[in-house]
Image (tube, grey):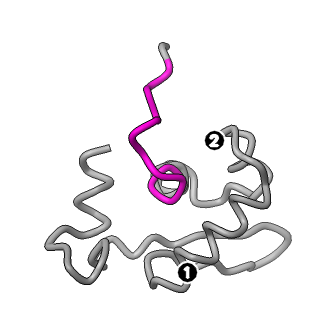
Amino acid sequence: MPRQPQALLTTNARILRAVHTNPRMSLVELADALEVHETTIRRAVKELEAQGLLTRVRPGRRNRYTIHTDQKIDPESRGTVGDLLDLL
């Protein structure tokens, strides 16, 4: 399968897409899948949590992420996270 061009997507959008596919990915797995340094992933996940777009819980040894698809992408946007994921 050919790789999709990702230059137009921010790291945050790429994380949301990856977590939407597999909500139990670890930060290391996210970093590997997105070919981004783990520190960048950690910072971006914290941003997404602070914006209310993503929640991370740790029910055991692994994180579990919940994407809040009904949240607006940003305060000025009419689109939601769910709308973005539908496009991706």
- Res 57 quadrant in image: bottom right
Expressed as whole percent of the image width and height from the top left, the position of residue 88 reads 32, 43
At 44% across and 27% down in the image, what residue appears? 5
Main SS class of the magenta portion in the image: loop
Locate residue 23: give its quadrant.
bottom right
Query: Judging from the image, what secondary structure is the residue with disc 2 in?
Result: helix
| Image position of 77 (left or right of 39) | left
Residue 1, percent from left and from top = 49, 13
Crowding at dot 2, Cα within 10 Å, few <14 / some 14-19 / many 20+, comes out as: some
Identity, as a three-letter code, of the amino acid under mark 2: Leu
Residue found at x 52% / y 74%: 48
Residue range of the region highlighted in magenta in the rendering: 3-14
Indicate which disc residue 49 carries.
1
Residue 78 % position (x, y): 14, 73
Mark carried by residue 34 = 2
Q: Is residue 28 above or below residue 55?
A: above
Q: Identify the residue at horizontal 66%, vertical 59% (top origin).
A: 24
Can you say whether 33 is above or below 51 in the image? above
Report if residue 52 lies within the magenta region: no
Q: Position of residue 28 (x, y in %)?
A: 80, 52
Q: Please tell me how crowded label 1 is: few (under 14), some (14-19), or many (20+) other residues with Cα within 10 Å.
A: some
Question: Considering the numbered disc 1 on the image, is that residue within a helix, a strand or a loop?
Answer: helix
* Inter-mark Cα distance, 2 to 1: 19 Å
| Kind of residue at disc 1 | Glu
**Is residue 13 on the magenta stretch?**
yes
Q: Nearer the viewer, residue 52 or 11?
A: 11
Left or right side of 45 for 67: left
The residue furthest top is 1
